[in-house]
Image (cartoon, rainbow, N blue to C red):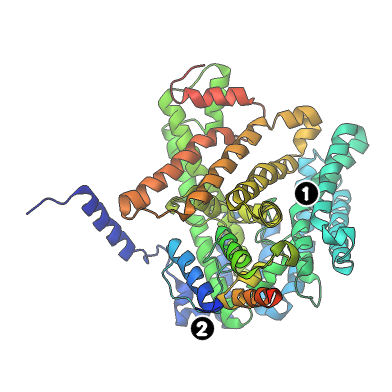
């Protein structure tokens, strides 16, 4: 399973837990549209820190960078390339 | 044939409710292609603005001047969407006169022109700080502009409270405090947006400092950067956003009517005292009967929801009419099954303020290797420290009237409430990963009632009246359980 699949699965799980069973497109807004909440953003942040080595205290936190599966995958990609 | 067990019939009822959850009291007109197409025509825009204007007239208490400026601005932004940001900025300037009248009332009279000058100078300071933070991002101020700003305002209030200026000087110092505080979180959001993508002009930054659609001390909906992201980009998006705004306004009016009848029935016809009144009667030694004290607490819980819904829906409806597809401030709070969910659904933009300025900074910086402690620490930073600071600064007039030390002591009940709320929200977040029970009874009804019960009981400590001590409030709380101490 590649990084994007893992992220999509994780986001889908968060949506299901909050009772959202609508289909999810990779470019669909998650936080600005209100489908996910601040506490879900914290879960995504924790995943990115633990699995992809991203330090938000260093790069700054911007919700737009976590607003879709595509955006999160891009961020995860940067984290992986920095670690490599 | 075996009789149905209680859980099977409640689950059947739940399934029925789920299958009918798409039912809407107000139809989803923004999903009807014909309506959306009509809302894009000149006639459609006029009909929409006319309908919205009629509803707004009721909601803003027949304030002709404010209504005229708002509807004039919204008409221009509807027909000239390309100049939306500039029009909104001009509308803000016009409304400043109106707001000055409000400020001068709260300062026991005063000169409108002086307060107007103070308003403009605070806006100018805000814009200058924003520019400095963008211009010198690596300077001490540029790296931590929000900490500088929040501590600067706090220090200013402390200095004025300690110096206790009197007479004309006192009037001007406290006027400055009042106006500075009213812009505090708007400027904080502007500073938080300093790293946003480069913008061609600062008109939206200016408009967001005193939004024409109204606000409380909490910016609705956040700052200019957020507004740019939710701004309608074409005529279809504008029509959909405006139709959603109209729907929300209708919903606000319906809830306002419910609120009026609610007060008339419960407090007028049934004679149940308001929560604050019941507490005051108890302190005076003439307590209302136990069932009335309970009833007043339960009503208080629903009245907060109604109050926030009516005011928040009205503001967001106007924001949507201006072309910004903002999320609602209050969204189905009674369907919450956890405390954190209720906190998020009740007063969304206040929760966002606490998250943006206190929760996230604490979460990203401290206790990274202790996941549970990290959440608890960030929650206390937001709810105990952030919420307390917000209220301390918002209610600055207490320091003017009582002095610094007595003023601080008068917040003891609020500090206690913030502490128990922070503890409860921490537990709620930590329990979030648990497997949730299914079914209507255990999955929805029982958790929802538990959430309501927590907020009903903790509501005793939520009184705005700062004259009661923590001991008095705690004794009143125990009296609800027939414990007299």
Q: Is residue B470 left or right of residue B146?
A: left
Q: Is residue B364 above or below residue B458?
A: below
Note whether B361 is above or below A63 in the view shown. Answer: above
Which residue is label 2 attached to? Answer: B37
> Can residue B164 be seen at all in this image of the molecule?
no
How many callouts does the rendering have?
A: 2
x%, y% of residue A1?
Answer: 49, 78
| Badge 2 density bin: few <14, some 14–19, many ≥20, Cα 10 Å | some
Q: Which mark is residue B101?
A: 1
At label 1, counting other C-alpha atoms closer than 10 Å, the crowd grade (few under 14, some 14-19, many 20 or more) is some
> Considering depth in this image, is B479 or B320 the residue closer to the camera?
B479
Residue at left offset 60%, top offset 23%: B471
Q: Is residue B205 visible?
A: yes
Which of pointers 1 and 2 indicates the residue nearer the eye?
A: 2
- The residue lying toward the viewer, choosing from B160 and B37, is B160
Letter of the chain that mark 1 sits on in the rendering: B
Do the residues at discs 1 and 2 belong to one chain? Answer: yes
**Residue farthest toward the front in the current orientation of the protein:** A84
Q: Chain of mark 2?
A: B
Q: Position of residue A55 (x, y in %)?
A: 69, 65
> Going by the image, does B229 lie left or right of A43?
right
Q: Looking at the picture, does residue B471 appear above or below residue B77? A: above
Q: Name which residue lies at 73% across and 40% down.
A: B392
Image coordinates for residue B348, horizontal then vertical, percent:
58, 55
User: Which residue ends up furthest to the right in the rendered image?
Assistant: B169
Callout 2: SS = helix
Q: Which of the two residues, B126 or B437, is positioned nearer the viewer here? A: B437
């Amino acid at each position: 399973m590649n990084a994007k699949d893992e992220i999509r699965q994780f986001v889908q799980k968060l949506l299901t837990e909050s009772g959202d069973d609508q289909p999810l497109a990779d470019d669909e807004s998650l936080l600005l549209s209100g489908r996910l909440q601040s506490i879900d953003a914290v879960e995504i942040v924790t995943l990115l820190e633990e699995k992809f080595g991203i330090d938000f205290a260093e790069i700054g936190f911007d919700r737009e960078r976590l607003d879709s599966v595509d955006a999160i995958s891009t961020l995860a990609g940067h984290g992986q390339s920095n670690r490599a | 044939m075996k009789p149905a067990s209680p859980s099977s019939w409640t689950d059947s009822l739940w399934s029925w409710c789920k299958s009918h959850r798409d039912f809407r009291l107000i139809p989803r007109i923004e999903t009807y292609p014909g309506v959306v197409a009509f809302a894009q025509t000149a006639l459609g825009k006029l009909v929409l603005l006319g309908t919205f204007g009629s509803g707004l007239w009721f909601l803003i208490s027949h304030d002709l001047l404010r209504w005229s400026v708002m509807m004039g601005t919204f008409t221009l932004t509807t027909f000239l969407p390309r100049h939306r940001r500039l029009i909104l900025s001009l509308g803000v300037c016009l409304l400043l006169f109106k707001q000055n009248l409000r400020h001068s009332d709260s300062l026991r009279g005063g000169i409108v022109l002086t307060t107007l000058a103070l308003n403009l100078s605070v806006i100018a300071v805000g814009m200058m700080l924003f520019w400095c933070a963008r211009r010198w991002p690596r300077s001490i101020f540029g790296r931590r502009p929000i900490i500088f700003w929040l501590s600067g305002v706090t220090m200013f209030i402390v200095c004025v409270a300690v110096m206790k200026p009197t007479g004309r000087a006192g009037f001007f110092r406290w006027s400055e405090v009042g106006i500075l505080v009213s812009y505090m979180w708007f400027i904080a959001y502007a500073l938080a947006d300093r790293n946003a993508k480069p913008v061609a002009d600062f008109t939206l930054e200016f408009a967001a400092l005193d939004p024409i659609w109204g606000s409380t001390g909490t910016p609705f909906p956040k700052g200019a950067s957020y507004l740019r992201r939710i701004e309608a980009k074409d005529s279809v998006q504008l029509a959909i956003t405006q139709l959603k705004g109209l729907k929300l306004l209708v919903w606000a009016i319906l809830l306002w009517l419910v609120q009026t009848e609610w007060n008339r029935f419960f407090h007028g016809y049934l004679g149940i005292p308001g929560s604050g009144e019941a507490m005051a009667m108890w302190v005076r030694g003439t307590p209302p009967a136990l069932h009335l004290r309970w009833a007043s607490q339960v009503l208080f819980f629903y009245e907060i929801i109604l109050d926030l819904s009516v005011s928040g829906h009205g503001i967001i409806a106007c924001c949507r009419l201006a072309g910004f597809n903002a999320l609602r401030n209050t969204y189905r709070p009674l369907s919450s099954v956890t405390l954190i969910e209720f906190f998020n659904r009740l007063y969304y933009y206040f929760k966002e303020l606490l998250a943006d300025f206190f929760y996230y900074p604490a979460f990203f910086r401290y206790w990274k290797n202790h996941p549970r402690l990290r959440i608890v620490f960030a929650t206390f930073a937001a709810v105990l420290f952030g919420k307390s600071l917000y209220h301390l600064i918002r209610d600055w007039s207490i320091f003017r009237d009582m002095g610094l030390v007595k003023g601080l002591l008068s917040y003891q009940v609020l500090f206690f409430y913030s502490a128990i709320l922070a503890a409860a929200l921490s537990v709620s977040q930590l329990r979030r990963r648990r497997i949730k029970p299914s079914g209507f009874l255990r999955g929805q009804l029982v958790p929802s009632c538990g959430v309501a019960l927590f907020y009903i009981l903790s509501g005793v400590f939520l009184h705005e009246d700062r004259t009661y001590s923590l001991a008095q409030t705690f004794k009143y709380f125990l009296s609800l359980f027939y414990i007299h101490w």
